[in-house]
Image: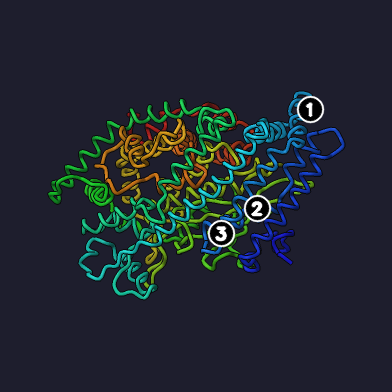
């Protein structure tokens, strides 16, 4: 019997990772699709008149085991993949895409949903029920239910091809990341690197049976090398490899895939009656239209560009004075920024790292969650996991009620994609009068412990951990009836608020005193270092803001107009970047071909949301600062009106209930040092 096809008989109904064979996924998903089709048939062929309960609720709670198994599979494909899993993904994705279309293009089902939707004013629904009904109706109308039969066939073909192209895009990026290795045999070429980075590079070489030191494109290897290595030619080599991922006209090239994805998305939007993919996407976002997004980004650009140009010119002058280089290139950015930061603030990342042992930072995040929201994290070894490095926790409230199961996976592996993310293995919902609690996971790529040192984080990694933990809290504290409205199932430009606001606590003395102790001596981080962290927090903020705006504009350039005339990915990108470019263009590099957020992940027409959410988080954190960063009343309001509500209501209504007003961008500009207080 296939273990995946029925409810798991495990503690807390957790995923039985150790008992799953990879080969189980494809047959299980085929079986579960068939089972869910039967559930859907029973709903659509019900002889009783359509009601909210027998149609909308029934549809919402259908296919739950299918949802669980597919979430397990695709989470593994991101965090612990291999060639077999990738091959299965290529088979599963079109099946799921086809099945999704089978639902949204089911005329009998749509008639029932529409019947309930058309009579909603008479139904006396709760706010959450009304949101669910609207969402279900739109899931049909926005996915082709009103199309002719021939157009429905076209839509199915587009969706099937898109699902495969996105997977292929990600596989190419991962293959390119894994394929590059810089083996160094002369120790002088490592001059400038911290001892911990050198030790990690030597251990990596040893693990692969190589002499010397090994540098890769994985962030814990790449970023320290680009920040500290004195050898400019090697920084250039590494930067060129990183920037040219999937842009080499070989088997892993993504240029045609980018063009195909952009064009198929446009064709899909046109088929559904929208002007562009961005118009389609943004209808369901706080921003609402591409025009509003572009206005938002360009207004920020106007504020940030003078500061960015001044910062860039200062950095170039500093680099020329220090090392007599002819001009500042992309591979000089992190290196000279770090040198200038040290000069201005006497602050070296390596000075900070001994105070940020990974285990201490985790405990710090847990303490912040306890002080704000009354949560306790109890590490347990009775929960199955997909890799031995994963840590598992029960999350309890002050009365020892289970709030969530929490998985944490911190180190790079060959089968794990770069970056950091939060995900879910089981959603929260209330069903049959039982509040089913969620299973939440965060995945990161931090420096591994070495033989002589534990995992010590850079300050940037500390904020990354808090960021993902903020997403996790949004999932853990969910308290809604319906799974599709639970936790992080919110408007995409609202989802970053809980993650980005939590980063603010990392800069506060009250927080750092909870966990920032020296890993060897136990000494609390000195006050002068805390002051330097605060003082340096807006260092190069203009350039950082310009960088984020450039990514948002590139995203909109691919998705807010007709892309059919674009034939050259690189030329299109250069044009999109023209108002935000600081560094000389590198012909061999292209961002679009490895821009996984928008071509593989869910951020297409949504990359602007990072800056949009910064407006929200800066405004929200000012409220905490005014009342005290651990003020229980403010924390309770944030938990009640933001974290627990998921997507049950319009996010601006939820935000105003928490804050008492709409967010003001001045808070972000003040924090970034782009506006005088």
Q: Tag 2, which secondary structure?
A: strand
Q: Quadrant of residue 581?
A: top left
Residues packed near mark 3 inside 10 Å, few (<14), some (14 to 19) or many (20 plus) = some
**Is residue 648 shown to the viewer in this render?**
no
x and y percent of residue 139 in the render?
Answer: 65, 36
Per the image, the residue denoted by label 1 is 123
Residues at marks 2 and 1 touching, judged by CB atoms closer than 8 Å: no
Per the image, the residue denoted by label 2 is 426
State whether residue 579 is above or below residue 205. Answer: above
Query: Front-most of 381 and 52?
Result: 52
The reply, left or right, for residue 317 in relation to residue 345 is: left
**Is residue 504 shown to the viewer in this render?**
yes
x and y percent of residue 4 in the render?
Answer: 69, 61
x and y percent of residue 367 in the render?
Answer: 52, 53
Marked residue nearer the N-terminal end (2 or 3): 3
- Tell which tag, 3 or 1, sits nearer the viewer: 3
Q: Tag 3, which secondary structure?
A: helix
Q: Tag 1, which secondary structure?
A: loop
Q: Quadrant of residue 281?
A: top right
Query: Front-most of 276 and 564?
Result: 564
Per the image, the residue denoted by label 3 is 76
x and y percent of residue 211 in the render?
Answer: 30, 75
State whether residue 365 is above or below residue 538. Answer: below
């Amino acid at each position: 019997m296939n273990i995946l096809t029925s409810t798991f008989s495990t503690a807390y109904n957790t995923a039985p990772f150790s008992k799953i064979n990879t080969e189980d996924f494809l047959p299980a998903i085929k079986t579960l699709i068939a089972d869910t089709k039967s559930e859907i048939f029973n709903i659509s062929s019900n002889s009783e008149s359509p009601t909210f309960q027998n149609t909308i609720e029934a549809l919402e709670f259908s296919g739950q085991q299918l949802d669980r198994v597919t979430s397990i599979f695709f989470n593994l494909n991101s965090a612990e993949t291999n060639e077999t899993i990738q091959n299965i993904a290529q088979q599963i994705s079109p099946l799921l895409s086809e099945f999704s279309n089978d639902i949204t293009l089911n005329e009998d089902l749509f008639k029932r949903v529409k019947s309930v939707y058309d009579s909603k004013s008479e139904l006396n629904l709760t706010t959450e029920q009304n949101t669910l009904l609207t969402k279900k109706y739109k899931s049909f109308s926005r996915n082709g239910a009103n199309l002719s039969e021939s157009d429905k066939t076209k839509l199915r073909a587009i969706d099937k091809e898109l699902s495969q192209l996105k997977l292929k895009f990600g596989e190419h990026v991962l293959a390119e990341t894994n394929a590059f290795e810089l083996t160094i045999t002369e120790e002088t070429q490592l001059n400038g690197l911290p001892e911990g980075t050198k030790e990690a590079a030597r251990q990596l070489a040893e693990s692969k049976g190589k002499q010397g030191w090994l540098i890769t494109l994985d962030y814990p290897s790449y970023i320290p090398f680009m920040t500290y290595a004195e050898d400019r030619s090697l920084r250039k080599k590494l930067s060129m490899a990183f920037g040219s991922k999937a842009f080499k006209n070989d088997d892993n090239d993504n240029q045609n895939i980018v063009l195909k994805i952009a064009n198929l998305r446009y064709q899909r939007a046109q088929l559904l009656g929208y002007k562009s993919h961005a118009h389609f996407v943004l209808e369901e976002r706080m921003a609402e239209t591409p025009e509003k997004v572009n206005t938002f980004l360009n207004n920020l650009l106007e504020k940030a560009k003078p500061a960015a140009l001044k910062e860039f010119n200062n950095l170039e002058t500093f680099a020329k004075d220090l090392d007599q280089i002819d001009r500042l290139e992309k591979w000089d950015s992190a290196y000279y920024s770090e040198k200038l930061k040290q000069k201005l603030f006497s602050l070296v990342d390596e000075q900070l790292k001994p105070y940020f042992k990974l285990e201490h930072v985790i405990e710090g995040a847990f303490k912040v969650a306890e002080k704000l929201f009354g949560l306790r994290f109890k590490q347990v070894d009775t929960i199955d996991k997909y890799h031995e490095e994963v840590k598992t926790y029960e999350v309890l409230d002050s009365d020892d009620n289970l709030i969530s199961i929490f998985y944490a996976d911190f180190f790079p592996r060959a089968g794990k994609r770069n970056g950091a993310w939060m995900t879910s293995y089981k959603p929260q919902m209330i069903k049959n009068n039982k509040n089913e609690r969620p299973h939440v996971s965060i995945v990161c790529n931090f420096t591994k412990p070495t033989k002589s040192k534990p995992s010590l984080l850079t300050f940037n990694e500390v904020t990354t951990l808090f960021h993902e933990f903020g997403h996790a809290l949004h999932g853990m504290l969910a308290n809604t009836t319906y799974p599709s409205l639970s936790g992080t199932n919110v408007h995409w430009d609202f989802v970053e608020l809980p993650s980005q606001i939590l980063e603010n606590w990392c800069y506060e003395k009250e927080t750092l005193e909870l966990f920032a102790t020296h890993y060897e001596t136990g000494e609390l981080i000195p006050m002068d270092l805390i002051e330097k962290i605060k003082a340096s927090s807006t260092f190069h903020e203009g350039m950082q803001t310009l960088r984020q705006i450039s990514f948002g504009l590139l995203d909109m350039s691919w998705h807010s107009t007709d892309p059919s005339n674009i034939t050259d990915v690189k030329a299109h990108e250069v044009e999109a970047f023209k108002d935000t470019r600081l560094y000389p263009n590198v012909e061999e590099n292209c961002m679009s071909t490895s821009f996984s957020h928008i071509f593989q992940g869910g951020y297409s027409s949504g990359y602007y949301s990072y800056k949009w959410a910064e407006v929200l988080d800066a405004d929200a954190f000012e409220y905490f600062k005014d009342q005290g960063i651990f003020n229980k009343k403010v924390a309770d309001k944030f938990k009640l009106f933001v974290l627990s509500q998921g997507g049950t209501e319009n996010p601006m209504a939820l935000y105003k209930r928490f804050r008492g007003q709409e967010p003001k961008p001045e808070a972000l500009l003040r924090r970034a040092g782009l506006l005088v207080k």
